[in-house]
Image (cartoon, rainbow, N blue to C red):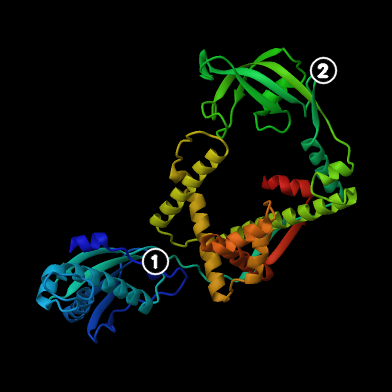
Amino acid sequence: MAELVDALVLGTSVARRESSSLSFRTIIKKNNLVGATMQISLDKTEGLERNLNVTIPAESINSKVSEKLKEYSKQVRIPGFRPGKVPQNILTQRYGKGARQEVLGDLINAAIQDGVKNNDLSIAETPEISEVKDLDDGSYSFVAKLELMPEIPEIDFSKVIVKTEKSEVTESDVDKMIKKLQKQKQEWKSSKAKIANGDLVTIEYVAKKGNKVVYPQSDMEKMGILLGESGVPQELVDSIIGMKTGEENSLKVSFPDVFNVAEMAGNELTVDFTVIDHKKGKLPKIDDDFVKSFGVESGKEDDLKSEIKDNLNRELSNVIQGKTKQAVLTALSKETKGIIISEKMISRESAALAHQSMDKAKQMGVENPPHPDHKDFEKMARERIINSLIISKVAKSEDIQVDYTKVREKVIEVSQTFENPPQIVEYYYKNPELLASIENTVLETQVIDWIVSKVDLKQKKVAFDKLMNETV
């Protein structure tokens, strides 16, 4: 029956992903399979692994196979016989093997679900089927290897101290944002003066390692740099300040691992460059046209400031929420020392984090980034698994359900970052996977809020800029 095991796909409904206590006992289960007795027993092996031993009686199998063949008889077309009138022996000869495999697939799933449910287990992944046997009396036996979800110990939240930060948006913060908006719309004019921080510069360069050219392979490459804001190494920026158009320089530069030129990323290179263009910016006046260009129809500066303050408060709220969540989970993780997490779980999560890291590099413009070693992410993977288990346990134990009013609010908040918010809201509610991601986020926030209400929360007030810059 190896081909059945290879083809069998066990439904994820088997895996109940909430924490529960374990009991180890042998079950002789009366299943609803035509009243026959299905034998199911559970053996504890190592760590979080358990073996579920199952024997399905021949009576159950044969009865279900007969029912399956009756279904086939209404569908198949065999010359010389009317639909539903094909003799049983012919059906068995032609379709018996396939019907038995299909029936066994259903019975295996049912048996595992019974074993999991009646032993009050929470399993982490699809069980592995082994030791498959067709017994002499027509019965069928197998062993399902289960991997249990780790258990989070009981936590006295009132004794947990959580340290985090808080802030507020001031008028000075609003003024700084307006200055940034002015810079976005500034006019650039060519200059022959010395280059200063904030100027827009174009250099023509070649990067070498020793005497070997690393990039570009031929001629020179151009790079535009907004000094003080572009993501180029600071030593290159410092060397440009004070120069003039037409001047040359050469220096060693250490490029970060994530840089938009893959050949230069992560290397210390000698950069020979010439300044070929230099522009200084002129900030626009804050007048009606300037204000209206940001969607404020009144054209009033006070209305623009009000909108900016609302946006900054919204961003600040999200940042504080994120930092508080991290502080809470970090504090709680200390209460879970000694928890057993299987290597398989850590390996899966590490691999997922490594893949996400590579995707992020691509989004930042790195072409063909190397696939990082997933072992480098094992510590982070363990932390994420524990965090998820803590949130799941609290949600279950406190019966915290998704607040769909908050889900709607979150969807609307997300939609505000797009040109047509109502269309985005409609799209989310028509896409179950997208909506589920919002529901999970909201439930997680509800759980963290509940935990915050129980722990000893100590908040330190810091400046808005400092708090936001720590997050970047």
User: Percent x, y for residue 237?
Assistant: 70, 25
Badge 2 density bin: few <14, some 14–19, many ≥20, Cα 10 Å: few
* Residue located at (58% from left, 76% from top): 398
Q: Amino acid at mark 1?
A: Thr
Write down the residue under mark 1.
12
Q: Is residue 335 something one can see in this rendering?
A: no
Q: Is residue 25 above or below residue 155?
A: below
Q: Is residue 120 above or below residue 204?
A: below
User: Percent x, y for residue 354?
Assistant: 47, 45
User: Percent x, y for residue 14?
Assistant: 38, 70
Mark number, residue 193 = 2
Quadrant where the image shows the C terminus: top right
Q: CA distance from mark 1 to mark 2?
A: 68 Å
* Residue located at (67% from left, 61% from top): 412
Q: Nearer the viewer, residue 105 or 285?
A: 285
Q: Amino acid at mark 2?
A: Ala
